[in-house]
Image (cartoon, rainbow, N blue to C red):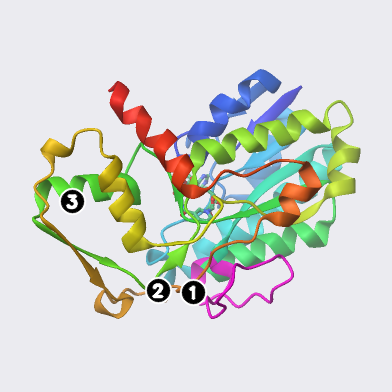
Amino acid sequence: MKLILVRRTGQLDWELQRTLAPLGEVHALGPDELDLSDLKALDGVMRSVKPQIVVNASAYTAVDRAEQEPDLAMRINAHAPGVMAETARALGAVLLHYATDYVFDGTKNTPYTEDDPVNPLNTYGQSKLGGEQAIGQVGGAHLILRTSWVYSLRGDGFVTKTLSWARRQETLRIVTDQVGSPTWARMLAEVSAALIARGLPVLQDYFLEKGGVYHLGGAGVVSRFEFARRVLQLDPRPEEQIVHALQPALMTEFPTPAHRPLFTPLDCSRFEQMFGVHLPGWDNTLELAMDDLKIN
Ligand SMILES: NC(=O)c1ccc[n+]([C@@H]2O[C@H](COP(=O)([O-])OP(=O)(O)OC[C@H]3O[C@@H](n4cnc5c(N)ncnc54)[C@H](OP(=O)(O)O)[C@@H]3O)[C@@H](O)[C@H]2O)c1
């Protein structure tokens, strides 16, 4: 079994490279091997590897910069997934692709289901929605997992930034009016690998039967403010923190080039029922994730 994983150093693809390894020969393509903005090269690389499975956790994820580079964001997030779907279908491969809660405008006050209308507020959200639609139009064997607030204990995401701010600033102002479902990249990668394993050896039939868009994130709902507070409570080295006050703020106090939706928790019950899994709460998962920091 051959798998293409588009990259290996992003939050999610780093974890996927590890969780997918027991399933077969993983071709995790680095920047020298593939640039998703080159659609012809993408098709060529896929045809030369001839995978049975294509996993795409790569995306143009710079939400603010996308406002200045809409064409590039569109090529990477919308057109490239369409090419992947088409080439995967031609090769008899399945496609597992990740999408975003930013397809919603955040005006609801209960978690979003797959049936809720989409209305992205920014270029990133529009381009990612374009990716979902392009894959859907090809109609091959695919699963699209819409996730939200992905974090990792590696790199420069919200959790690591919060820990770092707490070591440099006495006061932290964190927004209370942005609400979502934090999702640990490792949990997402493990569920993804389990999903593929469950479909073997008839993966194409499995993906064709179950195919479509599913919500998959950490269970529960939390504001950025409460999430940050929990991160600081779980910090294994609290003595390094100099922060004395965590102050509530509003999104309007931090203007950014891209508008962001305020409320985007995902209702993942369709995914749980379809695949017979139980998604742990964001709080339990964060505790497990933070344990990694005790080791280092
Ligand atoms: N982070 C979130 O809060 C969040 C929320 C909802 C959905 N998602 C979705 O979840 C997936 C994983 O997100 P993430 O947080 O793991 O993203 P990430 O850490 O920003 O990683 C993005 C990955 O995309 C790759 N990439 C960017 N431009 C590329 C190009 N032109 N060609 C090939 N690869 C390229 C990057 O590789 P290089 O660094 O080598 O360019 C990197 O490996 C994405 O589909 C994202 O849209 C994320």
User: Against 73, is 24 above or below?
Assistant: above
The magenta span reads 102-124
Report helix, strand or loop for mark 1. loop
Whether residue 150 is visible, yes or no, is yes
Report the quarter where the C terminus lies.
top left
Query: Would residue 139 appear left or right of 284 to someone viewing this image?
Result: right
* Residue 45 image offset from top left, x and y in percent: 66, 35
Residue located at (30% from left, 40% from top):
234
Residue located at (83% from left, 46% from top):
141
Query: Would residue 289 appear left or right of 3 to someone viewing this image?
Result: left
Q: Name the residue type under label 1.
A: Asn
Q: Earlier in the sequence, mark 3 or mark 2?
A: 3
Q: Categorize mark 2 by other alpha carbons within 10 Å: few (<14), some (14-19), many (20+).
A: some
Q: Which mark is residue 122?
A: 1
Q: Which mark is residue 9?
A: none
Query: Would residue 15 appear left or right of 242 to someone viewing this image?
Result: right
**Cα–Cα span, label 3 and label 1:** 27 Å
**Cα–Cα span, label 2 and label 1:** 6 Å
Q: Circle 2 is placed at which residue position?
A: 258
Report the quarter where the N terminus lies.
top right
- Between circles 3 and 2, the one closer to the viewer is 3
Q: Earlier in the sequence, mark 3 or mark 1?
A: 1
Report helix, strand or loop for mark 2. loop
Q: Is mark 1 within 8 Å of ligand 1?
A: no
**Cα–Cα span, label 3 and label 2:** 23 Å
Whether residue 7 is visible, yes or no, is no
Q: Which mark is residue 165?
A: 3
